[in-house]
Every structure is written in structure tokens, then in C-alpha cells.
Image (cartoon, helix red, strand yellow):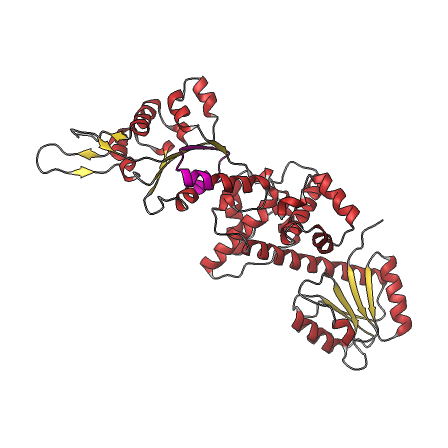
């Protein structure tokens, strides 16, 4: 059985015309509710109502213009399409200015009417979907961007982050560039007992070999007044030392870093005694360190010191259901910074969010949100995923199913109603995409 194209609430006081229009719309695949007077047609309308109102203008009691005004008071973004047999141009212009979605004169062709209603229904779905995303975002606690989402993998990652923070465990984060390794380390530091102490990030690929000892271990001057400088390792003591891209650290520096981690002592340049340090180290790498150990380009002892807890961070392409939440987070942050209202997502932008592979991960998504919110033209045709139209449509459909389950907190019946599909179709699609409703409860 073909799914309905959408819900139309028809208001028409001419009984024969009402019956004929209902029949035509139903034959065309629309679900139709018929009313021969305006006031009862207001009952049941709400901000969550998923359809479009199609109304005559000239009716006894209140006319279509007044009906549209009252509907706007319920939800100004609920589309109302007005029909009149009088071709009143002034009335049409004023109605459109007042927020009516469209205005057509009788008689109108069935094809024109259906096209207008399909377009209005598409606009309605877009409005409701944006609202659901905003509501879902509002329920997400303040987290690192890398931990926002509802996917099972990200829920597990949040739990693991809490355990690392509570136990102050050394760890190795792995994953593609831009997946949020440093963001996650900062989040763990922020929820730990050490949050009042410094978070020191060392970008290993940018270390200056000539300044390594002084910059990271500190100095003590010889002869004259005692002068001490504190290196980054000592500054991180009792806080967190984050070694970003540790695969880029030269072997001789790896040996010095291992000594500091294992012994809890450092020897600054010019010092006559070692200094004690309390180090909590999290390192990250986009490369396979075990492979580098096998080829002798990374120290095995440092690798095993750090890899007792190895945490792989997933790329966005394997947790697509999280992309809308993260995008909304970035967009909201841009809005707060610039004072601009977050624009509604167009169908093209929404499809791009759902179907693009995001090879740059969080960094790419953040830049995309920045451009979108500041009015810079974004071209979704750039970097299209290597997928067929059918595959992209499947991804989009799976995203809609997950969003419906998220908003309904895993209530399958409520999710079906939001999507307007039958129970059989709903569960068939969950099985097809490997989605479990119980994970959203």
C-alpha cells in the first residue's frame, strides 16, 4: 500500500465542491480531513500538527482570511492555502503579506493544486524537523563536540570518558584527523578532580628540537641569582598533559618523555637535583602506533606505557545520526557569538548533512556550520560522497527514523505517528537499517 503524500485539512462550505475536492485529493494520494464550516477546523491544530490547511475564502461566519489569522496564532509556520472564486488581487497580496502560504483562484487545475499542496507539505515537514532538532539539542548536556549525539558508539564513548576522568588513567586516543581527540581530552580534564589545574597541550609535530629541553623540562640558571623557568611538563603537574600527534615525536624525545612519565621526575637544564611531577598523560595519534613500533619508528616501551587504555574515536561517517545534533550545536554557538538567528535548514542543506561523508570530521562540519550561519554561500555539490542516489536516500531515511525515535524517547508508536507510517513499514525500515528503538529510551 502506498504511503499518503501528506495530510490536508480542507475547509469548504459548498457541499458538492467539498466532496469532489476530497475525492480528487484522496485519489492523488493525500490524506484528507473535510470541514464544511471554519471554526471546527481549528480544533486539533497545534505546533506539532503535520499537515496543511486548504480553505475557501468566502464562507459564512468567519472567512478564510480570518481562519488563516487564527491558525497563525496557533503556529505562524503552519501553511495555509486559500482558494477564492473572485480573483481578488488586493486580497491575495494582503493575504500573502500576512503569512498565507499561497493563494489561488477558482477554478484551478488539479495538477496545479497538487503541486502547491506538495510544496506546502514539504515546507511543513522541514519546519517540524528543524524544531525537533532544536528540541533534541536542548536536551543534550554541555559536552565536548566530539561527545554530542545519540548513537550507541558515542554513548559508550561518554561512559568511557567518565571512567577515565574518575580514575585519572593514562590513555591513547586514536582516529582520523578532526574526530575530536583534543576536544575529548579537554572534556575529560574538565570533569575530573584536576579541572582547577592546567591542561597543557603539546603538539608534537611542532616541537623545536633546539628548544625541547628548555621548553618542556625548564631551566635553572648557573652563577648569580637563582633563576628558574618552568617547562610545560612541570606546568602540567597535577593537571593534564596532552600529547597531540605523538607519532610525530622524534625517538630521542620519546625517551625523555618516557622517563618523566615512568619516574615522575624531571631534570631541568642546569639543575642539581630532579623535580617531582605528578603527571596524567593522554596522547593521541592518527597513525597506527603498533605498526610504527614494528618498524622501529616508535619506542615500544612508550607505546605500551600509553596504550594500556586505547580508545578509538569514530569518524562522522560511521555515526551519521549524530551529525544533525553536532551541526545544531555549532550553529547555535555561532548564533550566540554573532547575534544572528540560526537559519532554517533547506532540503538541500539537510540532504547534504545526511549524505556527505565529512572526511574532515568535526573540523569540516564546524566550518560548514560557520559558513551557513553567517550567510556565506555554501555549495553542497562540493565533495559529494561516493554513493549512488539510492544509497543517499537510504541514509536520509535512516536519519529521519533515528530523529523520530530520539524525539519520542524510543516510543515506537509516537515515532510512527510523527513519521506518518504504518507499524509494518516502520519495523521493516528499522530492520533494514539496523536501528533498535530500545537504544533511544
Residue 302 versus residue 169: which sits nearer the camera? Answer: 169
Residue visible at 35% across and 43% down? 194
* Residue 405 in picture, x, y percent from top left: 66, 50
Residue 439 seen anywhere in this rendered image of the structure:
yes
- The image shows residue 340, relative to residue 284, as above or below, that is below
Q: Is residue 23 toward the left or the right of residue 429 in the image?
A: right
Relative vertical location of residue 368 with respect to residue 59 in this rendering, above or below: above
Magenta span of residues: 162-185
Describe residue 264's horizontal placement relative to residue 345 as left or right.
left
On whether residue 307 falls in the magenta region, the answer is no
Q: Name the residue rendered at 41%, 27% in the picture.
A: 247
State the image coordinates of residue 173 (x, y, percent, origin top left). Answer: 46, 33
Residue 184 or 78: which is nearer the viewer?
Answer: 184
Residue 26 position within the rendered picture, expressed as x and y whole percent measured from the top left: 86, 59
x then y, percent, for residue 97: 66, 73
Visible residue check, residue 390: no
Rendered residue at 46%/22% (across/down): 290
Amino acid at each position: 500500500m502506498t504511503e499518503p503524500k501528506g495530510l490536508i485539512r480542507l475547509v469548504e462550505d459548498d457541499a458538492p465542491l467539498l466532496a469532489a475536492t476530497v475525492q480528487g485529493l484522496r485519489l492523488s494520494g493525500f490524506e484528507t480531513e473535510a470541514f464544511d464550516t471554519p471554526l471546527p477546523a481549528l480544533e486539533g491544530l497545534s505546533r506539532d500538527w503535520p499537515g496543511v490547511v486548504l480553505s475557501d475564502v468566502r464562507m459564512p461566519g468567519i472567512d478564510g482570511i480570518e481562519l488563516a489569522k487564527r491558525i497563525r496564532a496557533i503556529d505562524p509556520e503552519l501553511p495555509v492555502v486559500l482558494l477564492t472564486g473572485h480573483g481578488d488581487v488586493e486580497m491575495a497580496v494582503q493575504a500573502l503579506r500576512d503569512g498565507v502560504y499561497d493563494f489561488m483562484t477558482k477554478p484551478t487545475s488539479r495538477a496545479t493544486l497538487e503541486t502547491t499542496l506538495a510544496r506546502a507539505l514539504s515546507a511543513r515537514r522541514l519546519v517540524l524537523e528543524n524544531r525537533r532538532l532544536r528540541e533534541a539539542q536542548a536536551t543534550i548536556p554541555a559536552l565536548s563536540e566530539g561527545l554530542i549525539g545519540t548513537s550507541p558508539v558515542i554513548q559508550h564513548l561518554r561512559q568511557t570518558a567518565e571512567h577515565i576522568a574518575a580514575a585519572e588513567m593514562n590513555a591513547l586516543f586514536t582516529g582520523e584527523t578532526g574526530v575530536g581527540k583534543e576536544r575529548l581530552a579537554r572534556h575529560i580534564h574538565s570533569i575530573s578532580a584536576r579541572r582547577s589545574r592546567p591542561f597543557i597541550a603539546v603538539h608534537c609535530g611542532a616541537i623545536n628540537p633546539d628548544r625541547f629541553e628548555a621548553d618542556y623540562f625548564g631551566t635553572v640558571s648557573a652563577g648569580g641569582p637563582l633563576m628558574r623557568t618552568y617547562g610545560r611538563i612541570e606546568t602540567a603537574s597535577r593537571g593534564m598533559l596532552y600529547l597531540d600527534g605523538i607519532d610525530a615525536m622524534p625517538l630521542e624525545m620519546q625517551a625523555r618523555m618516557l622517563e618523566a612519565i615512568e619516574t615522575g621526575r624531571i631534570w631541568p637544564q642546569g639543575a642539581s637535583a630532579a623535580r617531582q611531577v605528578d603527571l596524567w598523560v593522554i596522547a593521541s595519534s592518527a597513525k597506527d602506533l603498533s605498526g610504527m613500533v614494528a618498524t622501529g619508528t616508535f619506542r615500544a616501551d612508550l607505546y605500551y606505557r600509553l596504550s594500556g587504555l586505547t580508545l578509538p574515536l569514530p569518524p562522522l561517517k560511521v555515526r551519521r545520526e549524530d551529525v544533525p545534533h553536532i551541526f545544531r550545536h555549532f550553529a547555535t554557538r555561532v548564533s550566540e557569538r554573532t547575534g544572528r538567528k540560526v537559519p532554517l535548514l533547506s532540503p538541500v542543506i539537510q540532504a547534504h548533512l545526511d549524505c556527505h561523508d565529512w572526511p574532515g570530521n568535526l573540523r569540516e562540519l564546524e566550518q560548514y556550520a560557520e559558513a551557513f550561519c553567517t550567510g556565506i554561500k555554501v555549495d553542497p555539490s562540493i565533495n559529494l560522497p561516493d554513493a549512488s542516489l539510492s544509497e543517499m536516500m537510504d541514509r536520509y531515511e535512516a536519519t529521519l527514523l533515528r530523529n523520530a525515535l530520539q524525539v519520542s524517547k524510543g516510543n515506537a508508536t509516537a515515532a510512527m505517528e510523527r513519521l506518518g507510517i504504518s507499524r509494518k513499514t516502520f519495523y521493516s525500515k528499522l530492520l533494514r537499517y539496523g536501528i533498535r528503538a530500545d537504544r533511544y529510551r
